[in-house]
Image (cartoon, rainbow, N blue to C red):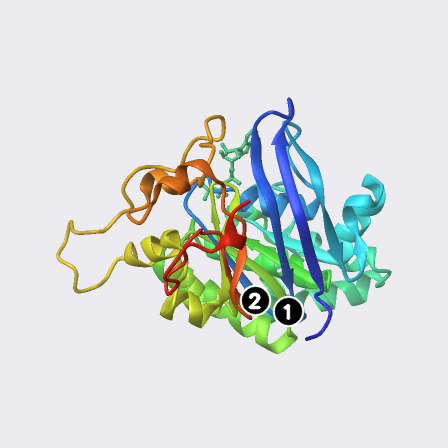
Amino acid sequence: MARPILEVKGLTTTLAGGTITILEDVSFGLQPGEVLGVVGESGSGKSMLALSVMGLLPKAVRRTAGRIVLDGEDLAALSPDRWRERRGSDLAMIFQEPMTALNPVMRVGDQVAEVLRRQGIPAKKARQETINLFRKVEIPSPEQRVRGYPHELSGGMRQRVMIAIALAANPKVLIADEPTTALDVTVQAQILDLLRKLQKERGLSLVFITHDLGVIAEIADRVLVLYAGRVAEIAPVRKIFDNPQHPYTRALLASIPEIDRPRGRLVTIEGAVPSIGAMPKGCRYASRCPFRRDICEQESPRLGLVSSDQAAACVQPFGFEKPQEEALA
Ligand SMILES: Nc1ncnc2c1ncn2[C@@H]1O[C@H](COP(=O)(O)OP(=O)(O)OP(=O)(O)O)[C@@H](O)[C@H]1O
């Protein structure tokens, strides 16, 4: 296997006081050209994970441990200035609500051209390249659209502009945080198709965050399941759907709405994610887990390999007849 383009190791973030942990010991690798889907319920820490990698954590949240290695360099060891530079060139992110990331008083074309100019591309060439990028992200009449302002565009078109900005940087890694969630269903499908096409064409290394396993099935090569700030399971997408090992992954799969399910029979996972200030001592999923044993409430399970490419943080993953010693911390 090639060296991962991005490797996150033991990432832990806390609220400023340091007593409340948001992400705990999160580790994963992203191979060049791979799409890693990150899935979990609201509040599981998906956005904090993305912002940690970008070096854009809100003031109240601090990274207290962990390495974020991009193409061999630990970003966490860099000065904030140097990290910002890497963010401008090697890392790009698209957000759920593009309006928050776009400058409302700047023409959208200029916002793309600015990224190109930063790479030393002369103004005229940057303008032409911006039109090419608009065409690439399938914005109709690109010559006219470049002169528009964000508020003149629909949500879907704004997200296309954000994708153009991300592509303009030619990043080594692109992070997409729920890029389709705020859009109408038909537009969601179009944006997802576009991202998938661009990913394939350009061999983008992509971290794709969503709470929607249907979206994961369409785009991801591997999947990281996050629960209450910890990795519950990580595996190739096929294994997540065909042979999930963590009870939480199974519950998420069971909660996918099915077209033929009678209306109102949407399955949800009983109970709620524990709040960040009141994490249980043992497994964080134990209170909701139909398979829990006494030990689950006492011990916090470590992420352990269940096969060569699948790991789960459960004392007794599915298919195992007895608790796994090494899964216990
Ligand atoms: N600025 C902040 N200050 C303090 N705590 C925060 C802040 N932003 C998020 N949190 C907390 O961090 C935890 C993880 O939040 P995060 O936004 O990463 O979850 P998420 O999985 O992305 O959820 P969603 O799908 O709703 O976006 C939550 O408990 C949240 O309340």
Q: Nearer the viewer, residue 95 or 293?
A: 293
Is residue 102 visible in this depiction of the protein?
A: no
Quarter of the C terminus within the rendering: top right
Is residue 24 visible in this depiction of the protein?
A: yes
Crowd around label 2: few <14 · some 14–19 · many ≥20 (10 Å):
many
Quarter of the N terminus within the rendering: bottom right
Crowd around label 1: few <14 · some 14–19 · many ≥20 (10 Å):
many
- For numbered disc 2, what is the local secondary structure? strand
At which x and y percent is residue 274? Answer: 41, 33
Examine the rendered structure and indicate whether residue 215 appears above or below residue 150: below
Q: Amino acid at mark 1?
A: Leu
Q: Quadrant of residue 216?
A: bottom left
Q: Earlier in the sequence, mark 1 or mark 2?
A: 2
Residue at image point 64% right, 66% down? 205
Residue at image point 32% right, 41% down? 288
Residue at image point 69% right, 58% down? 7
At which x and y percent is residue 44? Answer: 47, 42
Q: Amino acid at mark 2?
A: Val
- For numbered disc 1, what is the local secondary structure? loop
- Tell me whether circle 1 and circle 2 mark residues in contact (CB < 8 Å): yes
Residue at mark 2: 35
Outermost residue on the bottom side: it is: 201
Q: Does the numbered disc 2 mark a residue whose Cβ is under 8 Å from ligand 1? A: no
Examine the rendered structure and indicate whether residue 23 appears above or below residue 27: above
Residue at mark 1: 204
